[in-house]
Amino acid sequence: MLLQNEPGRPARLHVFVLLLAALGLLLRLYCYFCDPSIWFDEAALMLNVLDKSYSGLLGPLEYAANGPPLFLWLEKSLVGWLGDSSWTWRLPALAASCLSLILFVPVAWRVSAPEGAVWAVGLFAFSQRVLWHTVEVRPYTIDVLVAVGVMAAWLYTASWGPVKRLLLAAVLCPLLMCLSYPAVFVCSALALVLLLEIRNSRRAAVWLSYGVYLAGQALTLFWLLRGPVRFQNEGMRASGFEDAWIRQMPDWSTPAGAARWPFMALFEALRYDLHPTGGLLLICAVFGAGWVIRSRGRRLALLVFGPLAAVMAAACLHRYPCGQGRPILFLTPAACLAIGAAVPVLLRWCWDGFARSGQLLVWATPRNWGGRTAGVILASLALSPMLACLYCIAVPQPRPDGRGAAAYILSHRRCDDWVAIDSWDQLYFYRRFDPCWLCPTQRLLKGEEAQSRCWLTINTMMSNYEADEQALTGRQSWDICERKQFGPLIVLLLERRKTP
């Protein structure tokens, strides 16, 4: 169903879409310049980039870190060129997030009706998860950029010949797969779309170009699976982090759970990408996908929603997680397009009724209270992710201020003071020293260190601070001389108790 618009209305909607995109760019820049402290997965990746060579980043990584090789090389090059600072480390994530929003505007305008483009761009520009990963030293916003960029490139090159289009894909897809692991699913959907375009061609050059494209993609995938992916999976498996991914894959040992998994995977993926009410819009997203198939053609719909089918197939083979988690952030553009396409159509049905559709549901006529209530509920669910984004910016989630704690300790410590940290994510701030960071409380209790003073940091999000403090001061020979808090991170200055 194509929406009928009043004369001049699409132009006004186009201005509104650009305004939403501009606000989204401002929010991304605001989050970047807020410069939150480095933490957890960021520190793991940064330590590997600093400590390893370019070739070493292709092998096993420490601290259960993972990342595509080109992304790791990009970070290492930028740090070597611009210096070791959080501004430099997070610059690729910021650039990818802003560029993906810029490219998403024409994609949404082409895929959705004018009213649908407003909703789609609004959801994408104010996605709290995308904004969160915009200021994170991780490749997740690059995954989003790859998904949007392939859609934009396919639409932009619609007038090109098949050989030129295939050769462009043959050059770009291997690079994208080395820059973003989910690009494998995006490029697999593109391969199927290109096959549908050339299936009736009898030119040898066309099929030769397609063969070159497939060969390059297959060789790149084989190298990734046998090299960086295998080594990084071994590190995650050794650290126990792989269990979180396994829970996002179907359990074939229980038929009921396996049968329920597709619905739950889609629900959780939407709930993560469009927090907090994305999962409740699942039926709306399915309706929007159907609208795109009918109104925009199967090839464009396959390019938009094909990566979702590919990642679900990989999850069925226990090769990639599909559910509530960061690895599926690249599905956010498709979710926004589907929901954006459906919301204006469903709202019109709720407010205008089904009378024009053959009296399917008489209760939804404008005179009936039920139809208007359904419209209000639908609009509230669709607006909730945008409002939640603004709330999270106004009231940011507390995180350990490891940078502030490290600056305080390093400016107040004596030369012979011992520095102890209770989690490896703080090791980045003390990388030029040699602290004991593995279970420091236990070593203090056993008296394994000879220093008389110790600066101890305790992350209350990961440990029981009260129990550690009671154990140190109760029956052992340590006194707490100073206590300072940096968010959930507590810094203690311990001094060994003098024995009479």
Image (cartoon, helix red, strand yellow):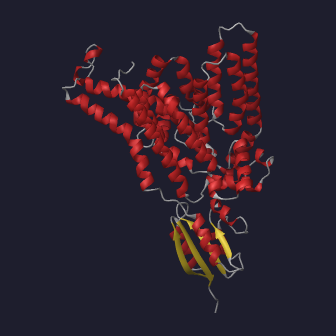
Residue 363: x %, y % from top left: 22, 23
User: In the displayed structure, does residue 423 sit left or right of residue 392?
Assistant: right
Residue 256 visible in image: no
258, 274: nearer the viewer: 274
In the displayed orientation, state which residue is furthest to the left.
367
Above or below for 497 versus 19:
below
Picture residue at 57% right of the left edge, 35% below the top: 249
In the displayed orientation, state which residue is furthest to the bottom.
500
Image quadrant containing the C terminus: bottom right
Picture residue at 19% right of the left edge, 27% below the top: 368
Residue 325: x %, y % from top left: 54, 42
Residue 334: x %, y % from top left: 51, 31
Residue 366: x %, y % from top left: 22, 25
238, 331: nearer the viewer: 331
Residue 17 visible in image: yes
Above or below for 207 versus 182:
above
Task: Report which quarter residue 279 is drawn in.
Answer: top left
Picture residue at 57% right of the left edge, 36% below the top: 330
